[in-house]
Image: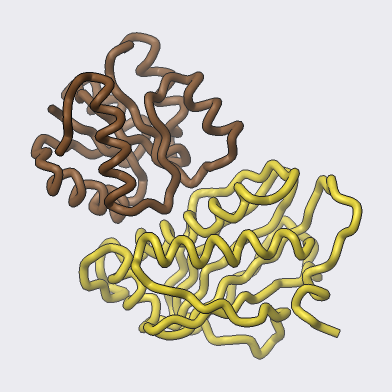
Chain colours: A brown, B yellow
Amino acid sequence: MKIMLVDDSRTIRNIQKKVLVQLGFKDIVEAADGVEALAAYKESRPDLMLIDWNMPNMDGITLVKTIRQTDKTIQMIMCTTESEKSRVVEALKAGVNNYMVKPFTAEMLSEKIDQTLSQLGITAS
Amino acid sequence: MDVRHINPFIVSIKDVFSTMAGVEVQVLKPKMKTDDSETVGVSGVIGLSGDAAGACLLCFPTDVACKLASAFSGEEMSENHPDFADAIGELANMIAGGAKSNFDGLAVTISLPSVVVGDPHEIVVTGVPSDTPRLIIPCQTEMGQFHVEVAMVVEKWAGQHQTSAADAAGAT
C-alpha cells in the first residue's frame, strides 16, 4: 500500500506521516503542491492520496480532476480547511472518495483512512 | 465588519489550538487596535477576498510562537527551525479557513499564508480603506499570550442589522 501526502505545509505532512506510520504504513511519498504531486503520481502510482485544497502552482481540486480523468480506482481524500457544504460537494463531484476538514486529530485521520480503505476491502489498523 | 463575523474567528481559534496542539485558549474581550497595541515578533498573515476583503493576522511574541509551534508540530521549534514559519503559516491558515467557512451568507476566499518574523514589526493591510478598523482578539494560553487581528470589509452584505467591529469591541 503506497500513500501520497500532498500539502504545501511540511508540518501538516509530518503530522499526517506520524499517524500513518503508527497505523503501520511504511511506503509514504510526499508532494508540496499539485504539480509536484502529479509528477510523483505518474512515477510512483500510489493507492491512496491525501490532498490539500489550497496550494501554490496547482490546487488540490485541479489535481483531483486531472487524476480522475484517467484513474478511476485510486482513493483520494481531500484534507482541507474548506468546510463549506458547497466545497464538499464540489470535491465529491470532482472525484474524491472522502473529505476531512482541518483541524483534525490523529483519531479523525485514522478513521477517514479506515473508511476510505474499507471501500477497497482493506483494513488500515 | 459585523459582530457576527467575529464569533467565527473566536470559535476557530479555540478549535485549531485545542485540536492540533492540545492547547486550550481563553479568548479575552476583543478590542480595537490602537497605535500602542502589543509588540509583535511573529505574524502569520492570511488575505481575505470575495464577498469580504481584508486580512487575518495571527500575532505572537517570539517565545510564545516557538512554544505553540512546538506543541503543534510535535517537535521542539525555535524561530530558526526550518519549519517554524511553515507551522505558523499553517496555524493562521486553519484559523482563517475555519472562520470564513462559518461566515453566514458570505463566500470568502483565503490566500496562501505569509509569515513575518522580526521583533518588532508592523503589518500593513492593503486592499481595504486605510481607516478600516482592526479588531484585536486577545488570547491567553498556558504558554503565554498572543492575539488575532482582523481587518475586514464586507463587500456584499446579505444581512439586515449590521453592527460594527467597534461596537463589538465596546469601543467609543
Q: Residue at x 54, y 26 (%)?
A: A90
Q: Nearer the viewer, residue B18 or A96?
A: B18
Residue A30 horizontal/vertical position (percent): 23, 39
Q: In the displayed image of the protein, which residue is found farthest to the right?
A: B160
Residue B64 drawn above or below residue B135: below
Q: Which quadrant of the rendered structure holds the C terminus of chain B?
A: bottom right
Q: Nearer the viewer, residue B28 or A68?
A: B28
Outermost residue, bottom side: B36
Q: Tell which of A76 and B11 is nearer to you.
A: B11
Position in image of residue B95 (x %, y %): 52, 59
In the picture, measured across the screen, residue B108 lies left or right of residue B153, that is: left
The residue located at (37%, 83%) in the rendering is B143
Q: Residue at x 75, y 44 (%)?
A: B105
Question: Which quadrant: the N terminus of chain B?
Answer: bottom right
Q: Residue at x 45, y 37 (%)?
A: A53
Q: Is residue B139 left or right of residue B22?
A: right
Measured as percent of width and height from the top left, residue B141 is found at 44, 81
Q: Residue B76: x, y in percent?
A: 22, 72
| Residue B3 left/right relative to B92 | right
